[in-house]
Amino acid sequence: MKTDKNALVISFYTNLPGSCQAEWVDDRMNALITKGFKITLISSRGVFKHENDSIRHIRIPCINPHGAKSELNEIQSRKIKINLLLRFYYRVMAFIDFIMKKIGLETGEGRWNWALSSLFSLFYGHGKYTFIYSTGGPASVHLLGIVYAKLLKSKLFIELQDPLTGEDIGRNKFSKLGLSLFEKFFVKNAYRVIYCTKNACKYSKESYPKYEKKIHHIYPGSYLEQGVESINFSEKKIRFTYLGSLYSTRNVTNLMEAIDKLHEDNPIYLNKFKIDLFGNIEEKILNEIKSFKHDIFVVNGLVSRELALNESLKSDVLLLIQNTDNRSMNTIPFKTYDYLRTGKLIFALTYKNKEINNLLTDHNHIVADASHSENIYHGLKKIIDNISELNFKITKSKLTPKKAVEEMLELL
């Protein structure tokens, strides 16, 4: 099908089951395709190639030794097909990375350097684009987006899935300064900068008042269709399901304290529910879960998004957990949008974030302070005592990738 609606999409990750950033951009591209767009996509080499006639997929490898080694690990673990020449290249880069580490030289994490190697995508030939859209975690994609926007004289949407600046963002003072300079550079050179929460958008407008008119927020949404069956909760254990990783301050320590208090109140409570965990769990947290004295948690490991969504539809309550540090003030976990579309009750452990609290309570879900075990205890008890009543009050979310695309196109 011929069309004059063409978009250049730049994302380090794509078509990589289990990767939030990949699923995010894949949802958006599918929504663009339904609007009649043809897409040229530039990504890392360590992903599966899209087999969609509406997507021209250009995959570029890292030129940084450590970045190339990381790509090779991804390729091998997921059995992504590569030719012999590329396999030889990755082996050489992995060897260089090994030698450099042995002599005490660090080569960096590699994804910044991808902004250089990805310039080879210029040789693939490009026509006229309605707009350019760069998105994802690694900020190198936005550097490439700026180069293409200048060369092709096209409008650039830079989408920051997580803000680069804010409290508890950045490993140290030098890192914070660097991220701040990059964010200002992105805001200055983009046609529109999209943040994914109102809080992050507001913070950016206050930080860069000169560019306030080009800064916007768009919720990414979820394509998931609801499929809820009537359940007799009196005849079964209530199944809580958590989808996502657990690490650092995003953990279950305070949740376990709340479960202890439930047991102290009445041991029968612990026979009424179980908690399934799907996703990567940091070793320290995993050991804490395994040594927990109550048999409540079931650890299932990492699964694909499709399987995770299937599990969510079979669940009774979906558990959401934020980090208990200030980065949570301006972020909303991507799975929140999938959760909202299931029609299942959500129990959210959030931290200093009125925006996500309002988003959830507006749909009649239950919110507790992730840093306060007493607050979590009251939320748990309320759900266990009133699950049937709470389940009937849930309202449907209208946040979808289609809506996100419509809002992007309005900004053109």
Image (cartoon, helix red, strand yellow):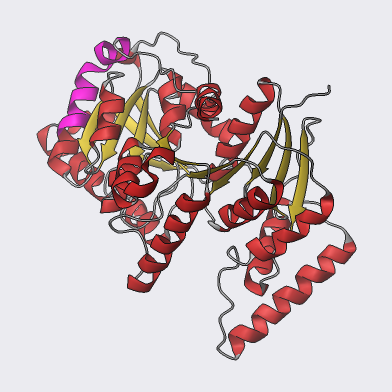
Tell which of 138 and 116 is nearer to you.
116
Q: Position of residue 157 (x, y in %)?
A: 55, 41
Does any portion of residue 272 appear in the rendered image?
Answer: no
On the image, the x and y values in percent for residue 132 come to 63, 41
At 53% from the left and 56% from the top, the residue drawn is: 139
Query: Where residue 338 appears, x then y in whole percent?
Result: 47, 28
132 within the magenta span: no
Picture layout, residue 188 above or below residue 64: above
Residue drawn 69% across and 64% down? Answer: 62
Q: Does residue 37 appear in the picture of this structure?
A: yes
Residue extent of the magenta highlight:
378-392
Q: Is residue 70 above or below residue 121?
A: below
Q: Residue at x 35, y 19 (%)?
A: 236
- Left/right placement of residue 329 relative to residue 195 reads left
* Overall secondary structure of the magenta section: helix
Quadrant of residue 34 within the rendered picture: top right
